[in-house]
Image (cartoon, coloured by chain):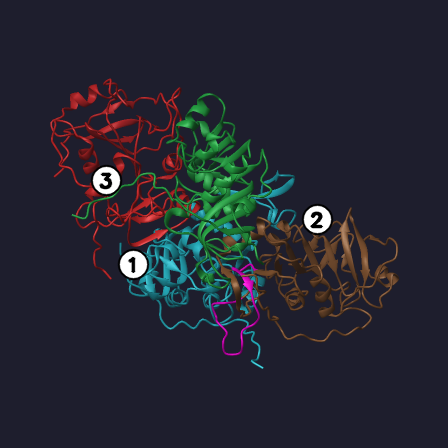
Chain colours: A green, B red, C cyan, D brown
């Protein structure tokens, strides 16, 4: 059971124009920097990207937007990105906005073989348009469907050749649920360890959800809002 | 094990100034009075975040950030910031003792499953039936609802922190929202620069005035149905 | 935020005749021994118990069955228990059998504010009787509803006064999902540690799901099927 | 990192005896030939568990146990058993390097989400359309379906390990199941003490005979539609 590939160029083999990708991360935290770099380099286009955010102008998914590689974004929040705004207002980019909790649950459902579920989020708003409404316990809910992707690309802190993953801090976010929902799931990790090094009791994503893994290089891990206090 | 954990403020405290109506700090100080011991609280981006600075003495609450953490602490010291540790506003933060980290699905399980006792968020408009609009202005760039729709659809206890009127002086406390909704019939309490109002039975019920603000001033600034019963006390902020 | 209570007798305060309880565990692995002991001692009756199994004759939920404290069991597998069989065949005990995966997901849904979801498990069987059927991706699914309980009682390895829990080995099983689904959740732990001792990144059940916690005593941790090999 | 991990057998091997039909060990040895490198496999309680003893050389597979573990290893050495580490049959087990532990919801997310490539389980009856009955005999004590209904409803690849006939000699390979179903139209392959059969187009297709067993014997023991095309080879077991 050895799922190790050499690098991000190898890892993204098979991703083709027009495919649907899931990309982990919240803001710029926990995004698969190496694979995004390879997608930029290979100029794969016409992509549908499922990602909570769309990066900033010159980092994260913003890099794919710059090159017009993305046809459609499925996200919950897409601010902080001028190029995104320009493409969207010009009708060059389709955007499907989804409540953040529904986005997370729809990914998990996709990975867990649950084709649809009811949630109260979005009832009475434009999010509910065209969706089935049903009352439970006197409260209206809307039926949301599962999301899956041709490839899910996630970023973890540590991983092993079995594909077992451990995330760090809030860089976990959407990565575990998207790892579940990819037909093929690629994990890039900061540190690839030997089999047996990770404590079986402390693994966040069991390797069964991961098909390819590699140790990434040169992580920038850019901070979007650096808020600090002085030591005095 | 019963020792109280130290809780440092999220931001530097700024001095509250009595201006005849409340500034942002006044609003969040008033909201902080609503906190109850043992509550888990989700604070929205912007003004609501400041509530964390004014936790009443002897009260222990935990802050949930929907990107995946409970037990959010102050901003890190300069030079100690960690790119892998941010809040839902993408600001670098720290963890308090007892903090936990989790994925986005678990985070919204907490929210949707009503394990969070209080949600504080901003709004562009609130209506007398409890509707809220805070995510979209047609014709302008749409940034997305983030976690707001999940929060307002599920929270049992939602307090909105907002200005009573817009920059043109038009009321944002309405009979009906004019902007696309974030959620329906969900807001229970509104704290503005002028007043504290409860929403029930399809109307705003005035319960407190900002220091130096008259009931008439509040009525004039309120487009929605405002019920005023008996003597309306001033907020006690300090 | 201190949720510590002295012991299991204190922890079960408020549990009344006729209530619905969830109890973690798979077989006899990871069951809340101390709380079961207190329920037996207090002779609370007419209980509806949601638990994957029903214990054995003289251990686990079998102890409650002996005293006729259980009105109804909601489980996936209830073998290995003669008293259970006797009560069930005599019509003294109601039994609702649910596919194990649906049981786990229904508890999680209850805790996650998902009132209902579609699953393929049980389609075409008596489990599907009276339930809505809908096709997704050409495959029939049945609509299953969330489960919640007046009290959920779980057993963990380590915990802290915030209610944060870490489980050990396969004693995790149903405990985390049931912890989410209790109106009040009681956690008994083998070791109660100081606040801040548990790594925030390695907590299985965040304390927000737990209302009461205590360090249990005298764990027997009985093994149901002791299978070993010799060292030669 | 590419070293092959040692995999010790779950139970002591017992010698296969050629009796003109297969014993349990023969059935599981034949099923083990279906394993493919890199597969995740769920083995049902009882006979299917034994498949783990006969993993073909050079093949690496991981065993999933639905109570919450992946990478299940051999039984522990006497005295090293851990009450907190059991499989779905409640037997004490060990973990192999790379193993992971998880909760029941995650476990069935793996199963329902089709992340497990092969499920092997026993049956009381199998029908020619792929229906399976293995959990309930009306009038007798009902023990429950455990995880079987989730497994058969979701697995893309289900192999049933069973005896061709019951103790009275009556066929369990049927045109229609008579017992309450566990799942419908889901079984793809059946390995019995007499034969290997594929299920497709509403019929059993004989593909291999047990050593020394004739096609006629198999036909006589099969109540459901049995398709026999061309020469049917004997299983190759060693």
In space, the residues marked 2 and 3 are separated at their CA atoms by 58 Å
Chain letter of disc 2 in the image: D
Q: Alpha-carbon distance for marks 1 and 2?
A: 52 Å
Left-right relation of D110 to C195: right
Task: Tell which subunit mark 1 falls on.
Answer: C
Task: Work out whether disc 3 and disc 1 sit on a shared chain.
Answer: no
The numbered disc on residue C210 is none
Residue B148 drawn at (x, y percent): 37, 35
Question: Dot 3 lies on which element?
Answer: helix
Q: Considering the image in quadrants, where does the C terminus of chain B appear?
A: top left
Is A208 colored magenta in this rendering? no
Front tag of 3 and 1: 1
Tags 2 and 3 on a common chain: no
Question: How many numbered circles does the render carry?
Answer: 3
Q: Is residue C99 above or below residue C171?
A: above
Q: Which mark is residue C196?
A: 1
Foreground of the two, A100 or B93: B93
In contact (CB < 8 Å): disc 1 and disc 2: no
- Name the residue rendered at 64%, 50% in the picture: C125
List the residue tagged with mark 2: D185
Chain letter for mark 3: B
Image-based side of D133 in relation to C175, left or right:
right
Provide the residue span drawn in magenta.
D65-86
Q: Is residue A113 visible?
A: no
- Residue A54 left/right relative to D11: left
- Which residue is at the front of the view, C30 or C8? C30
Q: Mark 3 = which residue?
A: B51
């Amino acid at each position: 059971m050895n799922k190790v590939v050499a690098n991000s160029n190898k890892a993204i083999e098979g991703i083709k124009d027009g495919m649907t990708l899931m990309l982990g991360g919240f803001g710029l935290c926990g995004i698969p920097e190496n694979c995004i770099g390879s997608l930029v380099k290979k100029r794969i286009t016409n992509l549908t990207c499922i990602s909570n955010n769309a990066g900033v102008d010159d980092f994260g998914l913003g890099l794919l937007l710059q090159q017009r590689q993305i046809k459609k974004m499925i996200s919950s929040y897409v601010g902080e990105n001028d190029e995104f705004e320009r493409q969207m207002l010009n009708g060059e980019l389709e955007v499907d906005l989804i409540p953040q909790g529904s986005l997370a649950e729809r990914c998990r459902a996709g990975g867990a073989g649950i084709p649809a579920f009811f949630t109260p989020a979005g009832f009475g708003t434009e999010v509910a348009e065209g969706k089935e409404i049903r009352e439970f316990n006197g409260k209206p809910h809307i039926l949301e469907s599962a999301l899956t992707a041709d490839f899910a690309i996630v970023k973890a802190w540590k991983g092993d050749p079995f594909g077992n993953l451990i995330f760090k801090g809030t860089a976990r976010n959407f990565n575990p649920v998207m790892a579940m929902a990819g037909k093929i799931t690629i994990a890039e990790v900061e540190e690839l360890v030997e089999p047996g090094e990770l404590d079986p009791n402390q693994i966040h994503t069991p390797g069964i959800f991961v098909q390819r893994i590699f140790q990434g290089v040169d992580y920038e891990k850019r901070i979007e809002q650096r808020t600090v206090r002085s030591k005095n | 094990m019963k020792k109280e954990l130290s809780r440092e403020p999220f931001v530097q405290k700024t001095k509250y100034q009595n201006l005849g109506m409340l500034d942002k700090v006044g609003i969040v100080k008033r909201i902080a009075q609503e906190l109850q011991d043992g509550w888990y609280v989700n604070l929205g981006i912007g003004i609501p975040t400041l509530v964390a600075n004014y936790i009443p003495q002897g009260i222990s609450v935990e802050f949930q950030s929907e990107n995946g953490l409970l037990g959010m602490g102050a901003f890190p010291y300069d030079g100690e910031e960690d790119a892998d540790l941010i809040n839902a506003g993408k600001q670098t933060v720290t963890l308090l003792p007892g903090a936990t980290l989790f994925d986005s699905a678990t985070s919204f399980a907490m929210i949707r499953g009503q394990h969070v006792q209080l949600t504080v968020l901003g709004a562009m408009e609130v209506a007398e039936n409890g509707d809220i609009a805070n995510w979209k202005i047609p014709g302008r760039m749409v940034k997305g609802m983030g976690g707001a729709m999940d929060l307002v659809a599920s929270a049992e206890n939602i307090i909105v922190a907002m200005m009573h009127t817009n920059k043109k002086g038009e009321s944002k406390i309405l009979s009906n929202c004019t902007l696309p909704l974030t959620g329906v019939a969900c807001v229970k309490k509104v704290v503005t620069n002028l007043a504290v109002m409860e929403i029930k039975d399809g109307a705003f019920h005035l319960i407190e005035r900002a220091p130096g603000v008259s009931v008439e001033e509040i009525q004039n600034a309120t487009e929605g149905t405002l019920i005023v019963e008996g003597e309306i006390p001033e907020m006690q902020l300090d």
